[in-house]
Image: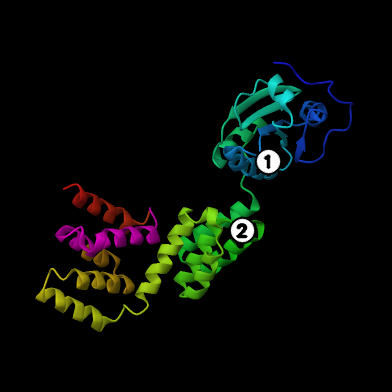
Amino acid sequence: METLVGQSEPQAPAADLIKDSDMAGFADDVIRASMEVPVLVDFWAPWCGPCKQLGPLLEKVVTAAAGKVKLVKINVDENQAIAQQLRIQSIPAVFAFHNGQPVDGFVGALSESQIKEFIGRLAGGAIGPSPAEEALEAGQAALEAGDFDQAIQAFGVALQADPEDPAALGGLARCMVQTERLAEAREILDKVPAQHADHKDVAGARAALALAEESEAAADPAEIVALRGRLESNPDDHQARFDLSVALNAAEQREEAVDELLEIFRRNRGWNDEAARKQLLKLFEAWGPTDPVTLESRRKLSSLMFS
């Protein structure tokens, strides 16, 4: 593989961690700069969808590495000679240079954790979380522990670094739901960019908000008694059983709420366009995939589905 030393006049290595370069600057920005620290070269093009996914993640992890590596971005449409010399056949392609030579690389988009592992290996040590990532982790831990004030503060710190972070937006919305500030939760979720609408934390927060809105007027003990009476008279009154499940969930009787939906599914799984199954999935999404009630209830639902 040919190196590209000598393609430009010598100049001081770039001080920036992340920069765009071209054929004229390659020798200084990559070859000479890699004598000091490893340099990643991201070969991309404006029409390349995976490039658009990979680029921001590379920049994020390189920034978090705090000078242990640098990133140079090369548009292959405008710099075909470089791509030809390095025999690049598909993009995104990332080459790692050290001491003036290519030493490692990969082709295609990687996850953030894989990029961290790659850069950590190149830099001689693991790349730790950024302050924003630490704040996000703290917020999620506080949310799980029920410390909503601390969670709100931590998610706020994460959103200062990235106002569109879906995990932070979803976590903050969950805090609002848990503290019965439903209008604020709705306002937060309305701000989520369209590209993050299906993110698991956003989807979970939307499901939690929908259940909370359903339950606002449902946790009446007298209503629960009346619905049970209707079911004693007619066990196949599926609407009464569905309404009872909503009321039980509002009363924080989650296992009982699930059991009523499972009973509807057992008796008539197609009732009201599979309303019982869809409501169960909404509950699971709101409670989260690792919640003990979710795990047990999913097992029961699977048993019924395949029985």
Q: Position of residue 171 (x, y in %)?
A: 51, 61
Q: Is residue 246 left or right of 122 when viewed as pictured?
A: left
Residue type at mark 1: give it.
Val
**124 drawn magenta:** no
Residue 195 versus residue 233 in the image, above or below? above
Specify few, some or many for label 2: CA neighbours under 10 Å numbering under 14, 14-19, or 20 or more: many
Give the Cα distance between marks 1 and 2.
18 Å
Q: Residue at x 26, y 51 (%)?
A: 299
Residue 79 versus residue 273 in the image, above or below? above
Question: Dot 2 lies on which element?
Answer: helix
Residue type at mark 2: give it.
Ala
Front residue of this view, candidates 227 and 130:
227
Q: Position of residue 172 (x, y in %)?
A: 53, 64
Q: Is residue 38 left or right of 172 when viewed as pictured?
A: right
Residue at mark 1: 62
- Determine if residue 147 is in view: no
Residue at mark 2: 158
Q: Residue at x 49, y 67 (%)?
A: 175
Residue 245 versus residue 7 in the image, above or below? below
- Determine if residue 233 is in view: yes
Q: Residue at x 88, y 33 (%)?
A: 12
Residue 211 quadrant: bottom left
Residue 259 versus residue 80 in the image, above or below? below
Q: Is residue 12 left or right of 124 when viewed as pictured?
A: right
Front residue of this view, candidates 10 and 103:
10
**280 drawn magenta:** yes
Q: Position of residue 203 (x, y in %)?
A: 45, 58
Which numbered marker is on residue 43? none
Front residue of this view, candidates 80 and 298:
80
For the image shown, how many numbered marks are present on the structure?
2
Q: Find the magenta span and give its range.
A: 261-289
- Of the image marks 1 and 2, the number of the one nearer the N terminus: 1
